[in-house]
Image (cartoon, rainbow, N blue to C red):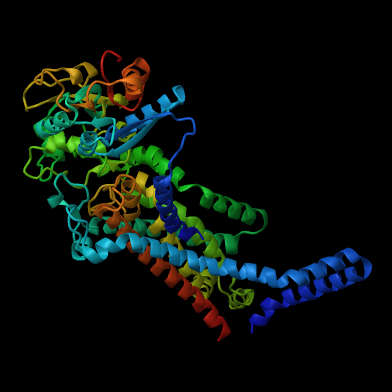
Amino acid sequence: MFYRSGMLMIATGMLWTQLLGCSHRSGKDAVVTIRVEGSDTMVNIAQAWAEFYHHLHPEVRVQVLGGGSGVGIASLIDGNCDIANSSRTMKEDEIEKATAKYGVKPKAIIVGYDALALYVHKDNPIDTISLEQLAEIYGWGGRITRWSQLGVDLDSPRRDTIVRVSRQAGCGTYSYFREAVLGERRNPEYKLGSVDQSGSKAVVTLVSKTPSAIGYSGMGYATADVKLINVSRRTGEPGTAPTPENAKKANEKERYPITRPLLIYLAGEPTGAIKEYLDWMLSAEGQAIVRELGYVPAGDHD
Amino acid sequence: MYGSWATCPRVIMINHSSAAVRQHKKTSSFFHWIQIALDRTEPLVEWLIRICGWSVILFVVAIFFFIFREAAPVLLGGGVEGEGQFSLIEFFTSSNWIPSPYKPAYTQYGILALLAGSLAVTGLAMFLAVPLGLGAAVYISEFCSGKIKETLKIVIELLAAIPSIVWGFIGYMVLGPVLIELTGAPVGINLLNGGILLALMSVPVIVSVGEDALKAVPDSYREAAVSLGASRWEIIYRVLFPAAKNGLLAAVLLGVGRAVGETMAVLMATGHAVQIPQSLLDPVRTLTATIAAELGEVVAGGTHYRVLFVIGMVLFVMTFVVNLSADLVIKGIHGEKTS
């Protein structure tokens, strides 16, 4: 039966996706239900918060849905959720609609930052790379394929080929890196042939084992075997170091270029259980979860 | 003429055991009652066994139906509105796999590169595994006996029992850096890495089926060859291989089936890069790994989700063809025996 195991695996995999998709946990003692919806990037954080918080406060049940930032905001305007997760700021017309419906402007709270660092092998001498160069490396039709084109000498000519490490299509990091780095290009797609990994940690592990690799991943995954490089907006300009401080700077010129705030939108000032939940999210305990998942915590909890 | 030789010992055994039962009937009423109970429940047991047998067919049909049902909307209708179009021609002729683009207009579902990746990894694995597997089968069947034979068989079974995720881990953490060091490859997880792992994973299948095929060659063939003055190598090459060729071919095809369907190890060890490989050291991506990596990220019911099921169908057809040809080849053995 060895030779059938492949098909069986696919089949059971599909079955599990179905089963998991249908399961709903129902708590008997749940009194308050908080509905959270929105960004797929934030769905992991929101899920972890919800589970942790339910342990601390069994009477509060937090229901988390993904679907994307736009979906979450639309849902907040329609009154279908209490908290909208969003990895972009609300658009003018969305703010207008929400204000018209609730009589107050929607309240935005920054709960963390998504900052993608560029990782290279620890022996790679490069220290700064620009967004333009990154776009030429990763982008469709991009012309940079060798380290020598960046003025970097990796000892052996066999190591001159840049091994670009990317993520699997569709995941939040994949989409955000494309938006931030390739968004301005005529064809904002990735060049095919990148080595795609299915996890933030896997990207860093692979880069640590591959001398000629470059990869992007959340800032929180740095290890001693990899090097994080500075990123500048234009070639030749001084780069900004990928640190939590630089990711949080308000001034766009000083801010680390590949970063975005992770936002929570509410239809007005929070009250009661929702307010308690929000306060807990921003506490040291809640922010530890943000750091654990590879994001940059908001506030001073570094 | 050898057919009766094979069944002979079994006939003796059956006579012997029924004689024993008869003796027990006389001496102990306990066995007598068991015998009666067995007689009574026999129709029930027969039905149970029949259901077990037929359920296998039911499962296969159900799996195919499920995959087809999920894939049908894009196969028949061309895709979900606003998520990019699906065309079968592009599916098989384009090497651009861009399932989740910035703008829907850039979507391309071309599996040519993935198909090339699957075939390249499988081909390389077979290139390595067939000589190794058949060699091991010949050694176990013809050259060793007693304890060594038993030990080797147990160890090879152990090799088959290693979970594929463990193989993948070995490829990713151990073999990858070694390959960079030895071959100067830019990246250690590549076609060669995946091929070596898959070869090691299919060797046990090839060895056990191949050894059975060699064992099935009657001893009189070997004796006749020895009496003609054939050397050991001549016996293997000139007598055993032609006599067991169907069984050995089946062993190879089963190995191919194992390699084509493997997912977790190739996902970790081949590099998962969408490109048609130009050299052994290029990273590649296989059909199975694509499904495994992307099914978790897609919106259920969307075009991308359904196209992954179309890939599932392609794989199903591929493994079906390989297994069917293996079965036909095995049938060939019986056909020759009875004629």
Q: Residue at x 44, y 23 (%)?
A: A57
Closest to the observer, B300 or A204: B300
**Considering only vertical position in the picture, is B264 above or below A137?**
below
Residue nearest the observer in this picture, B223 or A247: A247
Q: Position of residue A265 (x, y in %)?
A: 23, 27
Q: Residue furthest bottom?
A: B339
Quadrant of the drawing holding the N terminus of chain B: bottom right
Return the x and y of residue A51 as percentages of the image width and height.
41, 29
Q: Quadrant of residue A111?
A: top left
Q: How many marks overall? A: 0
Q: Residue at x 24, y 50 (%)?
A: B274
Observer able to see residue B278? yes
* B191 with respect to B25 (left or right): left
Spot the residue most to the top.
A300
Residue B119 appears in the figure: no
> From the viewer's perspective, is B124 left or right of B148?
left
Q: Position of residue A166 (x, y in %)?
A: 24, 39
Left or right of A123 on screen, residue B22: right
Between A295 and B129, the one nearer to me in the picture: A295
Question: Is A203 rendered above or below residue B260?
Answer: above
- Quarter of the image for residue A30 reads top left
Q: Which quadrant is home to the C terminus of chain B?
A: bottom right
